[in-house]
Image (cartoon, rainbow, N blue to C red):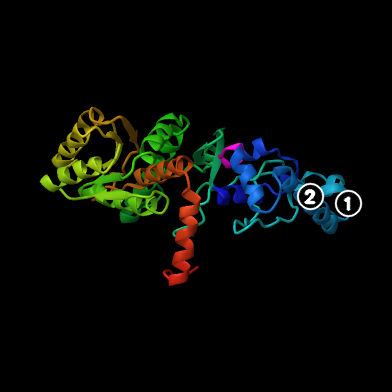
Amino acid sequence: MQRRIAHCLAQHAAEAPFLSSIEVAELAGVSQPSVTRFATALGYSGYPGLRRRFRELGVRQGRERDGSGRNGEDAGPDARISTATPRLSDGGADGRTGGRGERPAPVPPAPPEGSHRPSPDPGAPARCVPQRPGYRQLAPADAESWPDLGADRAAGAGGGYRRAVLAEIENLRALARSLDDPGPVAEAARLLAASRPLPVLGLRAAAAQAAGFAYFAAKVHPDVRPLHEAGSLLADRVEQAAAAGATALLCFALPRYPAELLDALRAARAAGLAVVTVADRRVPSLAGLSDVLLTAAVGTHLVFDTACAPMMLGRVLLEAMCDELPGAQARLEAFEASAAARGVFLID
Protein backbone atom coordinates (compact mmCIF):
# COMPACT_ATOMS: atom_id res chain seq x y z
CA MET A 1 0.00 0.00 0.00
CA GLN A 2 2.91 2.37 0.72
CA ARG A 3 4.18 1.85 -2.83
CA ARG A 4 0.75 2.85 -4.13
CA ILE A 5 0.69 6.03 -2.04
CA ALA A 6 4.21 6.93 -3.20
CA HIS A 7 3.25 6.49 -6.85
CA CYS A 8 0.11 8.58 -6.38
CA LEU A 9 1.98 11.44 -4.69
CA ALA A 10 4.71 11.37 -7.32
CA GLN A 11 2.14 11.54 -10.11
CA HIS A 12 0.42 14.47 -8.34
CA ALA A 13 3.66 16.20 -7.36
CA ALA A 14 2.42 19.66 -8.40
CA GLU A 15 -0.69 19.29 -6.22
CA ALA A 16 0.75 17.29 -3.31
CA PRO A 17 1.60 20.37 -1.18
CA PHE A 18 -2.10 21.31 -1.13
CA LEU A 19 -3.80 17.90 -0.73
CA SER A 20 -5.22 16.73 2.58
CA SER A 21 -4.58 13.20 3.81
CA ILE A 22 -8.19 12.31 2.97
CA GLU A 23 -7.75 13.55 -0.61
CA VAL A 24 -4.53 11.56 -0.98
CA ALA A 25 -6.31 8.47 0.36
CA GLU A 26 -9.11 8.87 -2.19
CA LEU A 27 -6.69 9.36 -5.07
CA ALA A 28 -4.54 6.38 -4.09
CA GLY A 29 -7.50 4.16 -3.24
CA VAL A 30 -6.38 3.48 0.35
CA SER A 31 -7.62 4.42 3.81
CA GLN A 32 -6.74 7.73 5.45
CA PRO A 33 -4.81 5.99 8.30
CA SER A 34 -2.65 4.33 5.62
CA VAL A 35 -1.57 7.79 4.44
CA THR A 36 -0.66 8.75 8.01
CA ARG A 37 1.35 5.53 8.45
CA PHE A 38 3.13 6.23 5.17
CA ALA A 39 4.24 9.66 6.43
CA THR A 40 5.47 8.26 9.75
CA ALA A 41 7.37 5.51 7.91
CA LEU A 42 9.29 8.28 6.13
CA GLY A 43 10.27 9.78 9.47
CA TYR A 44 7.64 12.52 9.85
CA SER A 45 5.38 12.94 12.88
CA GLY A 46 2.36 12.74 10.62
CA TYR A 47 1.04 13.71 7.21
CA PRO A 48 1.15 17.50 7.92
CA GLY A 49 4.91 17.25 8.32
CA LEU A 50 5.24 15.45 5.00
CA ARG A 51 3.04 18.04 3.32
CA ARG A 52 5.22 20.86 4.70
CA ARG A 53 8.21 19.14 3.14
CA PHE A 54 6.38 18.98 -0.19
CA ARG A 55 5.73 22.73 0.05
CA GLU A 56 9.42 23.39 0.70
CA LEU A 57 10.34 21.31 -2.35
CA GLY A 58 7.67 23.00 -4.43
CA VAL A 59 8.86 26.54 -3.57
CA ARG A 60 12.48 25.80 -4.39
CA GLN A 61 11.79 23.89 -7.56
CA GLY A 62 9.29 26.45 -8.80
CA ARG A 63 11.77 29.31 -8.35
CA GLU A 64 14.63 27.41 -9.92
CA ARG A 65 12.53 26.57 -12.95
CA ASP A 66 11.01 29.88 -13.89
CA GLY A 67 12.12 32.47 -11.33
CA SER A 68 8.52 33.34 -10.51
CA GLY A 69 6.65 33.34 -7.23
CA ARG A 70 5.45 30.40 -5.17
CA ASN A 71 5.15 27.23 -7.26
CA GLY A 72 5.20 29.31 -10.44
CA GLU A 73 1.93 31.04 -9.59
CA ASP A 74 2.80 33.93 -11.90
CA ALA A 75 3.65 31.69 -14.82
CA GLY A 76 0.22 30.18 -15.54
CA PRO A 77 -1.19 26.67 -15.12
CA ASP A 78 1.20 24.95 -17.51
CA ALA A 79 4.24 26.05 -15.53
CA ARG A 80 2.73 24.71 -12.32
CA ILE A 81 2.06 21.30 -13.82
CA SER A 82 5.60 21.08 -15.23
CA THR A 83 7.25 21.46 -11.80
CA ALA A 84 9.96 18.86 -11.25
CA THR A 85 8.76 15.64 -9.62
CA PRO A 86 10.19 14.79 -6.17
CA ARG A 87 11.03 11.13 -5.57
CA LEU A 88 9.48 9.23 -2.66
CA SER A 89 11.08 5.96 -1.50
CA ASP A 90 11.25 3.64 -4.54
CA GLY A 91 8.03 4.75 -6.19
CA GLY A 92 9.38 7.25 -8.74
CA ALA A 93 7.15 8.44 -11.55
CA ASP A 94 7.52 10.08 -14.88
CA GLY A 95 5.11 12.93 -14.26
CA ARG A 96 2.71 12.15 -17.11
CA THR A 97 -0.24 14.48 -17.29
CA GLY A 98 -3.40 14.78 -19.27
CA GLY A 99 -4.38 17.87 -21.22
CA ARG A 100 -4.09 21.44 -20.02
CA GLY A 101 -5.47 21.82 -16.53
CA GLU A 102 -6.11 18.10 -16.03
CA ARG A 103 -4.78 16.14 -13.11
CA PRO A 104 -2.15 13.54 -13.91
CA ALA A 105 -3.60 10.04 -13.98
CA PRO A 106 -2.10 7.88 -11.21
CA VAL A 107 -0.91 4.54 -12.55
CA PRO A 108 -1.73 1.65 -10.18
CA PRO A 109 1.56 -0.08 -9.25
CA ALA A 110 1.95 -3.72 -10.19
CA PRO A 111 4.28 -6.16 -8.43
CA PRO A 112 7.84 -5.43 -9.55
CA GLU A 113 8.03 -8.75 -11.37
CA GLY A 114 6.10 -8.43 -14.61
CA SER A 115 5.71 -4.70 -14.13
CA HIS A 116 7.28 -3.68 -17.48
CA ARG A 117 4.21 -2.29 -19.21
CA PRO A 118 4.23 -1.79 -22.99
CA SER A 119 3.09 1.56 -24.27
CA PRO A 120 -0.70 1.23 -24.62
CA ASP A 121 -2.01 1.62 -28.15
CA PRO A 122 -4.71 2.69 -28.52
CA GLY A 123 -5.76 4.55 -25.37
CA ALA A 124 -3.94 5.53 -22.24
CA PRO A 125 -2.75 3.91 -19.00
CA ALA A 126 -5.27 2.60 -16.51
CA ARG A 127 -6.27 5.24 -14.02
CA CYS A 128 -7.49 5.27 -10.46
CA VAL A 129 -11.15 6.26 -10.23
CA PRO A 130 -11.80 7.09 -6.56
CA GLN A 131 -14.91 5.41 -5.18
CA ARG A 132 -14.37 5.30 -1.45
CA PRO A 133 -11.35 4.87 0.84
CA GLY A 134 -9.96 1.35 0.60
CA TYR A 135 -11.22 0.57 -2.92
CA ARG A 136 -10.35 1.72 -6.36
CA GLN A 137 -11.87 0.88 -9.67
CA LEU A 138 -9.73 0.38 -12.74
CA ALA A 139 -10.88 1.70 -16.10
CA PRO A 140 -9.16 2.77 -19.30
CA ALA A 141 -8.25 6.46 -19.14
CA ASP A 142 -10.09 8.55 -21.71
CA ALA A 143 -11.67 5.42 -23.19
CA GLU A 144 -14.20 7.52 -25.09
CA SER A 145 -11.36 9.28 -26.93
CA TRP A 146 -9.98 6.07 -28.41
CA PRO A 147 -9.87 6.22 -32.22
CA ASP A 148 -12.47 4.27 -34.18
CA LEU A 149 -10.78 1.02 -35.04
CA GLY A 150 -13.92 -0.79 -36.14
CA ALA A 151 -13.44 -0.40 -39.91
CA ASP A 152 -11.32 -3.22 -41.25
CA ARG A 153 -9.22 -1.87 -44.09
CA ALA A 154 -6.87 -4.85 -44.42
CA ALA A 155 -7.31 -7.73 -46.84
CA GLY A 156 -6.42 -11.39 -46.67
CA ALA A 157 -5.23 -13.17 -43.55
CA GLY A 158 -3.98 -9.91 -42.03
CA GLY A 159 -7.52 -8.58 -42.03
CA GLY A 160 -8.74 -11.58 -40.07
CA TYR A 161 -5.97 -11.16 -37.50
CA ARG A 162 -6.81 -7.50 -37.19
CA ARG A 163 -10.49 -8.24 -36.65
CA ALA A 164 -9.56 -10.67 -33.88
CA VAL A 165 -7.47 -8.04 -32.12
CA LEU A 166 -10.21 -5.41 -32.47
CA ALA A 167 -12.78 -7.82 -31.06
CA GLU A 168 -10.53 -8.42 -28.07
CA ILE A 169 -10.20 -4.66 -27.55
CA GLU A 170 -13.99 -4.42 -27.53
CA ASN A 171 -14.13 -7.17 -24.89
CA LEU A 172 -11.81 -5.08 -22.72
CA ARG A 173 -13.97 -2.01 -23.28
CA ALA A 174 -17.04 -3.97 -22.18
CA LEU A 175 -15.17 -5.12 -19.07
CA ALA A 176 -14.20 -1.51 -18.28
CA ARG A 177 -17.86 -0.47 -18.51
CA SER A 178 -18.92 -3.31 -16.22
CA LEU A 179 -16.48 -2.10 -13.56
CA ASP A 180 -18.47 1.12 -13.19
CA ASP A 181 -20.24 -0.92 -10.49
CA PRO A 182 -17.41 -1.99 -8.15
CA GLY A 183 -19.71 -3.90 -5.79
CA PRO A 184 -19.30 -7.46 -7.16
CA VAL A 185 -15.51 -7.23 -7.36
CA ALA A 186 -15.30 -5.76 -3.85
CA GLU A 187 -17.54 -8.50 -2.44
CA ALA A 188 -15.50 -11.21 -4.17
CA ALA A 189 -12.24 -9.69 -2.88
CA ARG A 190 -13.50 -9.72 0.71
CA LEU A 191 -14.48 -13.38 0.48
CA LEU A 192 -11.21 -14.50 -1.08
CA ALA A 193 -8.87 -12.40 1.06
CA ALA A 194 -10.37 -13.86 4.24
CA SER A 195 -9.87 -17.49 3.18
CA ARG A 196 -6.89 -19.36 4.69
CA PRO A 197 -5.95 -21.30 2.61
CA LEU A 198 -7.28 -19.96 -0.70
CA PRO A 199 -7.93 -22.68 -3.32
CA VAL A 200 -7.84 -21.44 -6.94
CA LEU A 201 -9.48 -23.78 -9.44
CA GLY A 202 -8.98 -23.89 -13.21
CA LEU A 203 -9.35 -26.87 -15.53
CA ARG A 204 -8.28 -27.35 -19.16
CA ALA A 205 -8.51 -23.99 -21.01
CA ALA A 206 -8.92 -22.10 -17.72
CA ALA A 207 -5.87 -23.71 -16.11
CA ALA A 208 -3.55 -20.97 -17.39
CA GLN A 209 -5.78 -18.23 -15.96
CA ALA A 210 -5.93 -19.93 -12.56
CA ALA A 211 -2.18 -20.59 -12.53
CA GLY A 212 -1.36 -16.96 -13.37
CA PHE A 213 -3.68 -15.65 -10.68
CA ALA A 214 -2.33 -18.10 -8.08
CA TYR A 215 1.28 -17.23 -8.94
CA PHE A 216 0.85 -13.52 -8.22
CA ALA A 217 -1.64 -13.99 -5.38
CA ALA A 218 0.92 -16.10 -3.51
CA LYS A 219 3.14 -13.01 -3.22
CA VAL A 220 0.59 -11.23 -1.03
CA HIS A 221 -1.66 -14.02 0.34
CA PRO A 222 -0.13 -16.39 2.93
CA ASP A 223 -1.56 -19.66 1.56
CA VAL A 224 -2.72 -20.09 -2.06
CA ARG A 225 -3.47 -23.58 -3.38
CA PRO A 226 -3.81 -24.01 -7.18
CA LEU A 227 -6.20 -26.81 -8.18
CA HIS A 228 -5.89 -28.21 -11.70
CA GLU A 229 -6.37 -31.96 -11.26
CA ALA A 230 -9.53 -33.51 -12.63
CA GLY A 231 -11.34 -36.58 -11.40
CA SER A 232 -11.78 -37.77 -7.82
CA LEU A 233 -8.48 -36.17 -6.71
CA LEU A 234 -10.01 -32.76 -7.32
CA ALA A 235 -12.78 -33.34 -4.77
CA ASP A 236 -10.11 -34.57 -2.35
CA ARG A 237 -8.15 -31.33 -2.73
CA VAL A 238 -11.27 -29.21 -2.20
CA GLU A 239 -12.20 -31.11 0.96
CA GLN A 240 -8.61 -30.90 2.25
CA ALA A 241 -8.58 -27.13 1.75
CA ALA A 242 -11.86 -26.81 3.66
CA ALA A 243 -10.52 -28.98 6.48
CA ALA A 244 -7.43 -26.74 6.67
CA GLY A 245 -9.63 -23.68 7.24
CA ALA A 246 -10.56 -22.42 3.78
CA THR A 247 -13.78 -20.42 3.64
CA ALA A 248 -13.89 -19.57 -0.08
CA LEU A 249 -12.79 -20.92 -3.47
CA LEU A 250 -11.96 -19.00 -6.65
CA CYS A 251 -12.90 -20.71 -9.90
CA PHE A 252 -11.92 -19.74 -13.47
CA ALA A 253 -14.40 -21.22 -15.96
CA LEU A 254 -13.88 -20.81 -19.71
CA PRO A 255 -15.37 -22.65 -22.68
CA ARG A 256 -15.54 -25.47 -23.26
CA TYR A 257 -16.56 -25.99 -19.63
CA PRO A 258 -15.29 -29.35 -18.30
CA ALA A 259 -17.94 -31.54 -16.68
CA GLU A 260 -15.58 -32.09 -13.71
CA LEU A 261 -15.84 -28.39 -12.98
CA LEU A 262 -19.42 -28.71 -11.75
CA ASP A 263 -18.45 -31.68 -9.59
CA ALA A 264 -15.71 -29.60 -7.97
CA LEU A 265 -18.05 -26.68 -7.30
CA ARG A 266 -20.63 -29.01 -5.79
CA ALA A 267 -17.91 -30.43 -3.53
CA ALA A 268 -16.94 -26.88 -2.52
CA ARG A 269 -20.52 -25.96 -1.66
CA ALA A 270 -20.96 -29.22 0.27
CA ALA A 271 -17.81 -28.37 2.26
CA GLY A 272 -19.26 -24.98 3.18
CA LEU A 273 -17.02 -22.87 0.91
CA ALA A 274 -18.21 -19.67 -0.71
CA VAL A 275 -17.59 -19.84 -4.47
CA VAL A 276 -16.37 -16.91 -6.58
CA THR A 277 -16.39 -17.68 -10.30
CA VAL A 278 -14.73 -15.78 -13.14
CA ALA A 279 -16.40 -16.85 -16.40
CA ASP A 280 -16.84 -15.55 -19.92
CA ARG A 281 -20.63 -15.30 -19.53
CA ARG A 282 -23.45 -16.17 -17.19
CA VAL A 283 -23.73 -19.93 -17.59
CA PRO A 284 -26.80 -21.08 -15.58
CA SER A 285 -25.15 -24.22 -14.18
CA LEU A 286 -22.14 -22.18 -12.98
CA ALA A 287 -24.23 -19.29 -11.69
CA GLY A 288 -26.32 -21.67 -9.60
CA LEU A 289 -23.20 -22.90 -7.79
CA SER A 290 -21.52 -19.50 -7.36
CA ASP A 291 -21.96 -16.94 -4.59
CA VAL A 292 -20.37 -14.27 -6.80
CA LEU A 293 -20.13 -14.58 -10.60
CA LEU A 294 -17.86 -12.14 -12.46
CA THR A 295 -17.92 -12.17 -16.25
CA ALA A 296 -15.54 -11.07 -19.01
CA ALA A 297 -15.97 -12.20 -22.61
CA VAL A 298 -13.47 -14.34 -24.50
CA GLY A 299 -12.45 -13.69 -28.10
CA THR A 300 -13.74 -16.17 -30.69
CA HIS A 301 -12.25 -14.89 -33.97
CA LEU A 302 -9.26 -17.26 -34.04
CA VAL A 303 -9.03 -21.06 -34.10
CA PHE A 304 -8.58 -21.03 -30.32
CA ASP A 305 -10.36 -18.65 -27.96
CA THR A 306 -8.45 -15.68 -26.52
CA ALA A 307 -8.93 -14.68 -22.91
CA CYS A 308 -7.43 -11.20 -22.47
CA ALA A 309 -10.52 -9.82 -20.70
CA PRO A 310 -10.83 -12.71 -18.18
CA MET A 311 -7.11 -12.33 -17.40
CA MET A 312 -7.56 -8.59 -16.81
CA LEU A 313 -10.58 -9.26 -14.61
CA GLY A 314 -8.47 -11.67 -12.56
CA ARG A 315 -5.81 -8.98 -12.06
CA VAL A 316 -8.45 -6.43 -11.07
CA LEU A 317 -9.80 -8.92 -8.54
CA LEU A 318 -6.29 -9.47 -7.19
CA GLU A 319 -5.78 -5.71 -6.91
CA ALA A 320 -8.98 -5.43 -4.88
CA MET A 321 -7.85 -8.33 -2.69
CA CYS A 322 -4.64 -6.46 -1.83
CA ASP A 323 -6.78 -3.77 -0.19
CA GLU A 324 -8.34 -6.45 2.01
CA LEU A 325 -5.16 -8.35 2.92
CA PRO A 326 -3.36 -7.15 6.06
CA GLY A 327 0.39 -7.15 5.54
CA ALA A 328 0.18 -7.51 1.75
CA GLN A 329 2.77 -4.79 1.17
CA ALA A 330 5.14 -6.26 3.75
CA ARG A 331 4.93 -9.72 2.12
CA LEU A 332 5.61 -8.26 -1.31
CA GLU A 333 8.62 -6.31 -0.06
CA ALA A 334 9.96 -9.39 1.75
CA PHE A 335 9.72 -11.39 -1.47
CA GLU A 336 11.52 -8.67 -3.42
CA ALA A 337 14.32 -8.57 -0.87
CA SER A 338 14.68 -12.37 -0.97
CA ALA A 339 14.60 -12.45 -4.76
CA ALA A 340 17.28 -9.77 -4.97
CA ALA A 341 19.50 -11.62 -2.49
CA ARG A 342 19.17 -14.85 -4.47
CA GLY A 343 19.60 -13.21 -7.86
CA VAL A 344 16.31 -14.65 -9.07
CA PHE A 345 15.75 -12.25 -11.95
CA LEU A 346 18.12 -11.21 -14.71
CA ILE A 347 16.66 -7.69 -14.99
CA ASP A 348 16.03 -5.58 -11.89
* Residue 139 sits above or below residue 282 on the image: below
- What amino acid does circle 1 point to? Ser
- Secondary structure found at label 2: helix
Is 95 contained in the magenta span?
A: no
Q: Which of the 4 image quadrants contains residue 267? A: top left
Q: Residue at x 15, y 42 (%)?
A: 235
Q: Residue at x 82, y 57 (%)?
A: 65
Residue 325 horizontal side relative to residue 63, left or right: left
Circle 2 packing at 10 Å, graded few (<14), some (14-19), many (20+), is some
Residue that mark 1 sits on: 68
Residue drawn at the location 79% of the way across and 48% of the way down: 55
Q: Indicate the amino acid at tag 2.
A: Ala
The answer to which quarter of the image holds residue 48 is: top right
Q: Residue furthest left?
A: 232
Number of numbered markers = 2
The x, y position of residue 25, in whole percent, is 61, 39
Instruction: Identify which residue, 223 or 91, lies in the foreground.
Output: 223
Residue 150 can be seen in this image = no
Residue nearest the observer in this picture, 248 or 61: 248
Q: Residue at x 75, y 53 (%)?
A: 83
Tags 2 and 1 touching, CB below 8 Å = yes
Measuring from the top left, give residue 285's x and y in whole percent.
20, 30
The residue carrying pointer 1 sits among few (fewer than 14), some (14 to 19) or many (20 or more) residues within 10 Å by Cα, namely some
Label whose residue precedes the other's in the sequence (2 or 1): 1
Where is mark 2, residue-wise? 79
Residue 297 x, y percent position in the rendering: 33, 39
Q: Which mark is residue 31?
A: none
- Cα separation between marks 2 and 1: 10 Å
Residue 89 can be seen, yes or no: yes
Q: Secondary structure at mark 1?
A: loop
Residue 168's quadrant in the figure?
A: top left
Q: Which residues are magenta?
A: 27-32
